[in-house]
Amino acid sequence: MEIDKKIIQKLIQALEDLKKTIKDKDFSKIETESNIKEIIEETGTIIKSPIVGTAYLAPEPGAKKFVEVGKKIKKGDSVIIVEAMKTMNHVPSPSDGIVKKVCVEDGQPVEFGQQLIIIE
């Protein structure tokens, strides 16, 4: 494989020009609004998936959902079902609280440890 020296020189020059344009700028403190919002939303008790499977927000199609944002729940209440190999696994709430965010859609595949619900 033959390397074209002109291309390498152009790349080096482009990198040098880029260094000069960002020389006095501090990028260490830049955070986007979405990152800040995401960090704020993740405070509270996070209920994670105990297994890999499919998440269901209701006990059967067309039925009332287990939880919705703003709903009060008690420790031990089923908040979601994760189906794996035709077995319906009810995920209980670890504590009393109010549902702050539902992180998955009905019928969505989920991974082990994925955030399902955030409660405060």
Image (cartoon, rainbow, N blue to C red):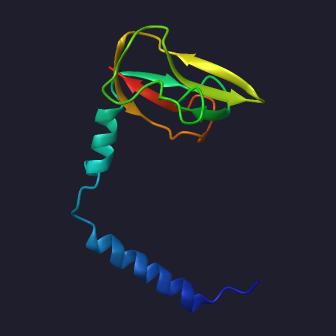
Residue sitting nearer the eye, 64 or 6? 64
Q: Is residue 69 left or right of residue 48?
A: left
> Which percent across, then down, holds residue 19?
34, 70
Q: Is residue 26 above or below residue 52?
A: below
- The residue sitting at 28% across, 68% down in the picture is 22
- The residue sitting at 66% across, 26% down in the picture is 51
Q: Quadrant of the C terminus?
A: top left
> Which percent across, then down, holds residue 56?
58, 32
Tell me where residue 37 sits by quadrant: top left
- The residue sitting at 60% across, 30% down in the picture is 60
Residue sitting nearer the eye, 60 or 13? 60
Q: Is residue 7 above or below residue 32?
A: below
Q: Is residue 110 above or below residue 81?
A: below
Residue sitting nearer the eye, 32 or 1? 32
Q: Quadrant of the N terminus?
A: bottom right
Q: Is residue 19 visible?
A: yes
Q: Is residue 40 above or below residue 76?
A: below
Q: Is residue 31 visible?
A: no
